[in-house]
Amino acid sequence: MRQLRIVLWIAVAVGLASIAGAYFVVKNQALPPSPIGGAFAMTDNTGKPVTEKDFLGKATAYFFGFTHCPEVCPTSLFDMTQRLAALGPEADKLNVVFVTVDPERDTPAVMTEYLKMFDPRIRALTGTQEQTDAMVKAFRVYYKREPKDADGNYNVDHTASIFVMDATGRYVTLIDYHESEPNAVRKLKRAINS
Ligand code: NI
């Protein structure tokens, strides 16, 4: 009898523990800690200091790269130009932000000049090395500056994905460098409407 009671108490304890566990899981799904993104302080291409708060209220697509990039960055910014066109009026609910991982060369003036090749709604951010590294870390971006060649030029290897956040700054999805255009536009719409 006593043994049965102990077994029953254990069963009750296990039952309560699993309910508590399930509640904990559900609660944490409802309030996920943002895995990508967060606070940053940078300077935009007009020379104005900006933080993540300046981009709230609209969905935002962040892309990290550098203006001397031979292929991935111009291709991605050209793709984003096409996607803004594909979104039509909905594009007004989206920020597109190019963040340099090469602050030594990418001053606001250099970035403003570079952006002339793309949709005029695309903005660019630069910062000190410390500000850049903090933002890169928050977004879990990878970049590696290669050694300078004889002419003083260098390449910067970097993450090619586009990070899509909703209007509250919460991470929604990634757009891969090789994403199909219909998928990319669908993902941007999802962020705009979430
Ligand atoms: Ni690039």
Image (cartoon, rainbow, N blue to C red):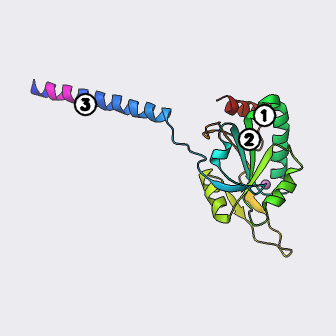
Magenta: main secondary structure equals: helix
Residue located beneath label 1 in the image: 91
SS at circle 1: helix
Among the 4 quarters of the image, the one containing residue 18:
top left
Height in image: 126 above or below 86?
below
Q: Amino acid at mark 2?
A: Asn
Q: Do we see residue 130 in this rendering? A: yes
Q: Residues in magenta?
A: 5-10
Looking at the rendered structure, the secondary structure element under dot 2 is: strand
**Helix, strand or loop under label 3:** helix
Name the residue rendered at 87%, 56% in the picture: 113
Residue 29 as seen in the image, left or right of residue 139: left
Q: Earlier in the sequence, mark 3 or mark 2?
A: 3
Residue 133, percent from left and from top: 64, 60
Q: Residue at x 85, y 38 (%)?
A: 82
162 vs 117, nearest the viewer: 117
Q: Is residue 68 visible?
A: no
Compared to 45, does 186 lie above or below?
Answer: above
Mark 3 or mark 2, which is nearer to you?
Answer: 2
Q: Give the label on residue 182, or none.
A: none
Q: At which x and y percent is residue 168?
A: 61, 37
Which residue sits at x=81%, y=29%? 89
In space, the residues marked 1 and 3 are separated at their CA atoms by: 54 Å
Residue 125 location, quadrant = bottom right
Residue tagged 2: 95
As drawn, the residue found furthest toward the bottom would be 150
Instruction: Point out the image quarter for the C terminus.
Output: top right
Q: Residues within 10 Å of mark 2 (few under 14, many from 20)?
A: many
